[in-house]
Image (cartoon, rainbow, N blue to C red):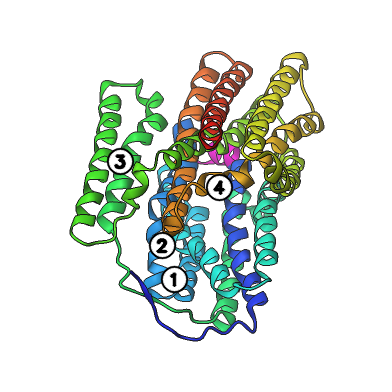
Amino acid sequence: MHEIVSTPVDTSRRWWVLAIVVAAQFMFGVDAFIVNVAIPTIAVELHASPAQIEAVIAIYLIGYATLVVTGGRLGDIYGTRNVFVAGVAGFSLTSLWCGLAQSGPELITARLAQGATAALMVPQVLATLHLLFSDSARARAFGIYGIVLGLAGAAGFMLGGVLVTLDLAGLGWRAVFFVNVPCGAVIIAAALSIMPTVPRRVGTRLDLPGAIVLFAGLLCLIGPLLFGHDVGWAAWVWLVMAAGVAIIAAFVRLERSVARRGGMPLIDLSLLSDLAFMRGLVAVFFFFFANLSFYLVMTMFMQEALQIAPLQAGLVFVPLALTFVVASRHSGVRALHRGTLVLIEGCGLQVVGLAALVTMVETTAAPSALMLALVLMIFGYGQGLVMAPLSSAVLSTVKPASAGAGSGMYGTTTQIGNAAGVAAIGAVFFAIEAMTSARVALFAACALFVLSIMSSAAFLSWMRRAKA
């Protein structure tokens, strides 16, 4: 049991505190999408291979996924405000490093550090909201948080296109990282002056060995998917992936050993035997497998195959992101009446959107940015129907005592799914593009998207039947 020190928390300026922490969350959300628009330009200037380009996105997600639970526990140990400020400072400095990178490998390393510091910053956002808004204002506060989270995607795509196009001070793509530095400085100054100190949890301990082993396992499992094509899928690539599977298995054994010694494992081992929750996590994995990778593939296709300028390419996604926000708001009401069926409907709508995209690309020699934007709105609305209530549906299977641990496993699974999707689907896209054409590569990637989305829908249907 974790005892909370009974220290009064100042809530008099909580709405200002809300603005500070959601600004940090917004910066993190923007960064997840702003890079996609700049990727083709980064590849040219740094002479980065397709594998390195995929790694720029995937390694960030892996670093975040493996340390986000540890980041939350550090907040319990050292105080939410202290860890939040340290995370924002680290995120700002590593963003500066990303912008100064002179090669693909250096940018990959900087992105790993950026993901690790984001894992310090982001968990403190929800922890702060939970602490400061325990009354009737809670729904409004979390509503604002959700809207900001949704708008971050639209802002990321648009800002990425604007910064690359304007080429401020000749910085080019580097500006998409540099922009975090002044934003981070403002957030830190405001946090130090306004955020209250919060109670610390006595008895909370870290599981650094678990985090290190999980990181090594994911790197061995996903890394070869990134670089396999560059080395001709040599035999050692498959051996490394097999080692990754073995390390993940060893991670579970390590966690059980930590629990037996009275420690605090990185994951709640009791959840591994919760069949309904594990089915839900499988659905989550497949859904997110087809999430971020879609934007990478579409960005590369638009800028390289269709020769759409970065600004226009970024604007193509803005209606999609806004439609996603609208659908997210609608999905809560629909879920009350239709349950998990609304998630299956959302998956189906995504498939319709992908089919419409493939049909347009096949029948139109050079589809315009406006045409693509209109079609992608279908995909975005379907995605919004699923994303918002998915966490509620999966976490509803978890006992209240394990809610925090379940949320941590859910968040980690989403980022692992994103990273695996970028690695696998990106590898297929670049490999087929090199052999035939970008259009064929896009069709193949869309086929994989459909398989992933339908797999997610199948597991959601399984959960729905189990509840019936």
Q: Is residue 165 visible?
A: no
List the residue tagged with mark 2: 71
Residue 375 in percent (x, y) is at 76, 29
Badge 4 marks a residue whose secondary structure is helix
**Are discs 4 and 1 less than 8 Å apart at CB?**
no
The residue sitting at 40% across, 24% down in the picture is: 229
Mark 4 vs mark 2, foreground winner is 4
Q: Is residue 311 above or below residue 350?
A: below
The residue sitting at 61% across, 72% down in the picture is: 133
Measure the alpha-carbon separation of dots 4 and 3: 25 Å
**Which residues, given as a range, are shown in magenta?**
39-47
The residue sitting at 51% across, 30% down in the picture is: 462
Q: Earlier in the sequence, mark 2 or mark 1?
A: 2
Q: Is residue 294 above or below residue 318?
A: above
The disc placed on residue 309 is none
Residue 166 in percent (x, y) is at 72, 50
Q: Could you say which quadrant of the image residue 297 lies in?
A: top right
Q: Earlier in the sequence, mark 3 or mark 1?
A: 1
List the residue tagged with mark 1: 83
Q: Earlier in the sequence, mark 4 or mark 1?
A: 1
List the residue tagged with mark 4: 391
Count neighbours of disc 1 (C-alpha within 10 A) and say few if under 14, some if 14 to 19, many if 20 or more: many
Measure the alpha-carbon separation of dots 2 and 1: 8 Å
**Magenta span contains residue 45:** yes
**Are discs 3 and 1 less than 8 Å apart at CB?**
no
Q: Nearer the viewer, residue 349 or 242?
A: 349
Say what amino acid the circle numbered 4 marks: Ser
Q: Could you say which quadrant of the image residue 139 lies in?
A: bottom right
Q: Is residue 30 visible?
A: yes
Measure the alpha-carbon separation of dots 4 and 2: 20 Å
Q: Earlier in the sequence, mark 4 or mark 2?
A: 2
List the residue tagged with mark 3: 217
